[in-house]
Every structure is written in structure tokens, then in C-alpha cells.
Amino acid sequence: MINNPVTGNENQNNLATEFVSCPMCSSSRYKAVMTARDLIHHIPGTYNLVQCTDCELVFLNPRIPRDKISIAYPSDYAPWGKDPFSPLKRILTARVRRLVAAPCRKPLNNPLKQLKYLYDTFSYRSLPSRDAGTRLLDVGCGAGQYLLDLDDIGWNVEGLDVAPVTNEKVRSRGIRIHTGEPELMDNLGPYDIITAWHAMEHLWEPLKALERFRKWLRPGGFFIAAVPNFAGLPARIADENWCGIDVPRHLVQFTPSTLTGMLERAGFEVLNVHHKIFSGHTSGTIRLMAQAKNYAYPPSPYDRIIFRPIEIIIDIFLWLADSTHTFGILAQKKTDPYP
Ligand SMILES: [Zn+2]
């Protein structure tokens, strides 16, 4: 048992001063897992990941206090920036979205369902089934591109993010955006579906947030998320150079097992865990590993052109091994026994 694995000396310049108990089970027993630096935005300091010895959740400890965390999100933080997809890719994926989102209650051997399965595997975000309803809240909506994608095909969408959404397209369509942290908000909804694409690992109190989501969902409503996979082969091979580490912004590192455990504690039943590929994490990790060894690395966008073929092969291998950079999870709100 280690209560404070890092003391003042080593961490003197760190902004991370807040020691916390386990965000899942509140235990204060944990062991050191890894010390990492911010390799993406170069916020100074070293950051320690620890693992709860009771529930096995891996989390950042100590972490930057909530009132100072904005320093870790510079103005060029990618999710708040421009849409990363080319207009051509957007048109093509819009066609696929229209196809797979069509109401479809046929069995799983239906070709449309198979297409949807492939879409969910290969896309950064998944597409909820329209059978579940169409009122959706996207948590951590960033610049709001996912909201626009769903608005295009007739969904009734709302977004939630800590930063105000400045995307003019989102504003001009009148899409409602809530600004704040989900665990501190109340009385939203009711929604058929809540999505969180690479948002859960940024939350201060992820269990409390899931309890809020459960409250905001209609009976039988769905929660769909994707997070970096700390149990995946890339995380184990690249260690502190894995691009999913992303300290000090990622406060929790989930595995399929710990996110399932947290969802069950919050009153959800997990229906499906699926591995996602082509997220760009392979080339991102190769870049961080090259930087760590001071190897020459081609500048963007040449790196993508050079490494794209390698990335495709590696990602397919990881997918076949069920051990990718990121995993998606689908959970359903359990019926309240005391409605
Ligand atoms: Zn715990």
C-alpha cells in the first residue's frame, strides 16, 4: 500500500498537488503504476498513475486541482479545434450514416446491421441505433461535429462541454449546448441516448457523472462511450509513451473491466464492449516513441502519408487480437426497482 507515492522533492515544480482517493470505490489504498510526462502539450512536471488495490481502477494521483486545470488545455487543444475530416471523407461518411441509421428491427444477420457494426469499428465515434430513439446528449461534444453529423440525418441532439462551443454551424442550427461539468449539473434530459466520445477519462468524478447520466436517461435508455484502452497491447508496449496516457488531462485510465465495473455501480447493464481501429493512435504513439528516443520523425502531414499503410496493418492485427488502442462500450439503464 502506498498512500502518497510521490512526495515534495521529486515533484516540486508540479502543478499536481491534489491527492485523491479512488474515483470508483473511494479506497485510499493504491500502488504506483507509472510516472509520465505531458508529451503532447508539454505542461511541465511529472505525473503519477496509481492503481487502486481494491477495485483495480488506474487513476492520476496527485492531479492538478480543478480550479487550475485550464492550464492543461491550451488554445490549440485538438477536440476544440476545427473538424479534422476532409470534405470528401465527410460526404462519404454521411452517405454511410444515412444508410446504417435507417430504422431497422430485423435480426443481426441483416446487411445493414453488419454495415453498422463495421462503421462502429472503423469510426472514431459510433452511430447509435435509431431503434433506441433519437433524443441524444453528447457529453464532451468539443467543436460539435458529431452533433452536426446526427442533426444532418434528423436526430434531436444536444451537447455538453466544459468549454463553450464556438462552431458557427452548430449555433446557426440552433443546437442546444450546455456548458459545465456533468457531475456538477442537474436536471437535464430526458434523453434516449447519452454518448461520451473520449470524455470519461477527463472527468473529475466519473462515477458521479455516470449516476447523473442514468438519471437523465429515459427508462431503458442507452449510454455509449469510447475511451483509451489501458489494457490494450499498445498501452503495454509503449508504456509512458503511449498516446492514450495524455497526462495531466486524462485523470482516469480505463480497461474494459474497470469501465464495466463503474457502469454497473452506477446502475447500468453493459451490453457490449467492442474494439475500435483507425483512431490515429498508432501513428501518434509511433511519433511519441520516436521523440522519446530522439529519432528523426517526418513532420505532419508527411508522417500520416508514410505511416498510414503501416498503421492500417498494425491496427487490423490489434483488432484481430481484441487489444486495440481504444474500446467502445454500450450500456443500458437498469430499471429502477423503486420508481
Ligand atoms: Zn477503487
Image (cartoon, rainbow, N blue to C red):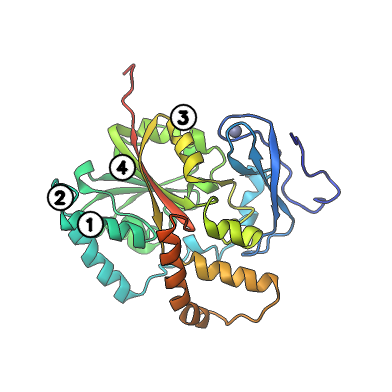
Residue assigned mark 2? 103
Mark 1 lies on a secondary structure that is: helix
How packed is label 4: few (under 14 Cα within 10 Å), some, or many (20 or more)?
A: many
- Position of 122 with respect to 47 (left or right) is left
| Residue found 54% across the figure and 60% down from its top | 234
Mark 4 lies on a secondary structure that is: strand
Residue 105 location (% of width, % of height): 14, 45
How far, Cα to Cα, is label 1 from label 2?
14 Å
Mark 2 lies on a secondary structure that is: loop
How packed is label 1: few (under 14 Cα within 10 Å), some, or many (20 or more)?
A: few
- Looking at marks 4 and 1 on the same chain, the residue that comes earlier in the sequence is marked by 1
Query: Does residue 154 lie above or below 339 as drawn?
Result: below
Residue 223 location (% of width, % of height): 36, 41
User: Residue type at mark 4?
Assistant: Ile
Q: Are marks 2 and 4 in contact (CB under 8 Å)?
A: no
Residue assigned mark 1? 114
